[in-house]
Image (tube, rainbow, N blue to C red):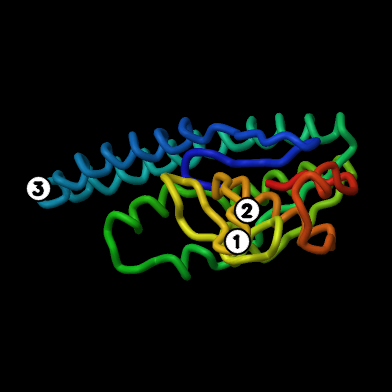
Amino acid sequence: MNLTNVTALIDGEIGRYDLRGLYHIHRAYEIKRQRIQKLSKIKPNTSRMLLKKYSKRERNKARDFMHKLTASIARGLKEKSCGAILENLKGVKRRILNGSKGMNRKLSKWNARTFQFMLEYKLKWLSLPVKYVNPKNSSKVCPVCSGSMASYLGRLMKCKECGFVMDRDVVAVLNLQMWGEGFPQRAPNEIIGGKGYVCL
């Protein structure tokens, strides 16, 4: 799950769910907060009231966006009678925070854990299974030979051992599905389909 999309492997096909709308909600309210904060020195009470008002609106709009998206995903998985393998992102923001204002600002717009929580309870309500897998190095391990992968071109990764080249997000979902289902490391075309799970 990135800032602007969720990559998934479903029935052997790669799909991407667009999160740009969610990102833009946070960005729009970030701009509003910056304007309101300029009032804090001359109108502190007004500033506090406005910040509270718009923070609530931002949360409501973000949650509405995620509720609709996760409901759509859950319905699709119910039709296929399959659950989901998700990245275990517990504590990820704390690990990534590096003191950079730019990175911290981006992370404030990342609702990965809330997204997963909403999707999980919808899937469980539909009696569909959910697994969490440690995503460490999932985009850096070759899904074909288990070799080490390195950045190649743009978002592509290339295996140093066998030369396999693929988008980093696709590499990650292939590995997460294999790890989540307990498959040995093997070529992607052997593991696609799996045991009734999709990987997000």
Mark 3 neighbour class, 10 Å CA radius: few under 14, some 14 to 19, many 20 or more: few
Say whether residue 93 is visible. yes
C-beta proximity under 8 Å, tags 2 and 1: no
Q: Mark 2 or mark 1: which comes first in sequence? A: 1
- Judged from the image, the secondary structure of the residue bearing numbered disc 3 is loop
Kind of residue indicated by mark 2: Ala
Q: Could you give the CA–CA distance between mark 3 and mark 2, rounded to whole angstroms?
A: 50 Å
Q: Could you give the CA–CA distance between mark 3 and mark 1, rounded to whole angstroms?
A: 41 Å
Q: Which residue is mark 3?
A: 42
Residue at 71% of width from left, 62% of height from top? 133
Mark 2 neighbour class, 10 Å CA radius: few under 14, some 14 to 19, many 20 or more: many
Q: Which mark lies nearer to you, 3 or 1?
A: 1
Q: Mark 3 or mark 2: which comes first in sequence? A: 3
Instruction: Point out residue 61 in the picture as x, y percentages from the top left corner.
Output: 49, 34
Instruction: Point out residue 186 in the picture as x, y percentages from the top left corner.
Output: 78, 57
Residue 89: which disc? Answer: 1
Q: Is residue 20 above or below residue 46?
A: above
Q: Could you give the CA–CA distance between mark 2 and mark 1, rounded to whole angstroms?
A: 14 Å
Q: Is residue 61 above or below residue 182?
A: above
